[in-house]
Image: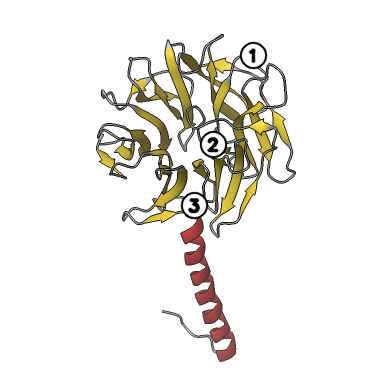
Amino acid sequence: MFKLHKNTRTAWMLVTLTLLMSAGVVAFMHLTSADDGRILFSQFDGVDYEIFVIDQDGNLEQLTNNDFNDWGAAWSPDRSEIAFRSDRDGLTRIYVMDMNGNTRAVTPQNLWAGDLGRTGTPAWAPDGNSIAFEGYDAYAQDANFNIYVTNLNTGETEAVTNHPNDEWHPQFSPDGTEIAYARADHNQDCYNGCDIFVMDADGTNVRQYTFTKGMDVFPQWSPDGSQILFHSERTGNSDIFVMDANGYNQTNLTNTSSLERVPQWSPDGNSIVFRSERDGDSDIYTMNLRTGETQAVTEGEADERFPDW
């Protein structure tokens, strides 16, 4: 309850300003709260993939609706925008869309940003000013996938890796100083041999973190930077793993006979969201890391992939 100042005009101005500020905070939290529980994912509608968002109460909203594939959406750090992949202009590019549906391409037309089978979600830098992604120069001879970073303020895109093996799935560390990513083994498709690496954000100081036969891909830093999620086929099945940020203590979190992939952390770091085929089709699930409890976020026969919490 407000205590009025002796000067009535001043008091009412203060009350009005306080109410306006409170309303503004509520509106801002709706758009940008990092713990509002909304999960992005891509769904196949029978023709192509479109992007949806679902809240904690199961309310579903479709964010894209066209005759092209839109997939791999990722929240910006303030949750006011999403970055995603689309082939609406021919070659796959990275796009950014705000909550009003205003959409713009942010990567060059010559950089093919990959297909549905291999690519992950674009990776926002913690300051929201740049996006990392895997790209392939469509106009270059003998080109392969490398890690690129696009500066959203200047529009400039530069390669931060230049390796003869394909490199995929970049993810900035929470402080923005490092990038985790996957690199294919020599002369191998990533499905047959891929490991997790970490480098400084400028592409230097490269370290290898996994050394397994098969596919270790899609690394994702925990919000506090202490751990890295990834999915692996080292057991002969696709499962969700976690390891310390230095590569030690690699642990299988799901350990089922079903395909489970593309994990992401919850904003508070206490849960993860991932894709699973445990019910016969591809759905989105969450797991509480403290209790191990797993719950379905989506259900039905539609194919759903690429969650981001």
Q: Are marks 1 and 3 in contact (CB under 8 Å)?
A: no
Label 1, label 3: how far apart the Cα atoms are: 37 Å
At which x and y percent is residue 255? 28, 23
Task: Estimate how packed mark 3 is, as few (under 14), some (14 to 19) or many (20 or more) residues with alpha carbons within 10 Å.
Answer: some
Name which residue lies at 36% across and 39% down.
303
Question: Residue at (37%, 37%) from the top-left corner?
Answer: 272
Q: Amino acid at mark 3?
A: Asn
Q: Which colour assignment does the render follow?
A: secondary structure
Give the CA distance from mark 1 to mark 2.
Answer: 28 Å
Front-lying residue, 95 or 262: 95
Disc 2 is placed on an element classified as loop
The residue located at (34%, 42%) in the rendering is 302
Q: Dividing the picture into quarters, in which one does residue 41 lie?
A: top left
Q: How many marks?
A: 3
Q: Quadrant of residue 157?
A: top right
Quarter of the figure that contains the C terminus: top left
Write down the residue under mark 1: 164
| Mark 1, other Cα within 10 Å: few <14 / some 14–19 / many ≥20 | some
The label on residue 65 is 3
Camera-side residue: 92 or 204? 92
Residue 134, above or below 194: below
Nearer the viewer's eye, disc 1 or disc 2?
1
* Quadrant position of the N terminus in the picture: bottom left
Q: Which residue is mark 2?
A: 174
- Can you say whether 220 is above or below 70 in the image? above
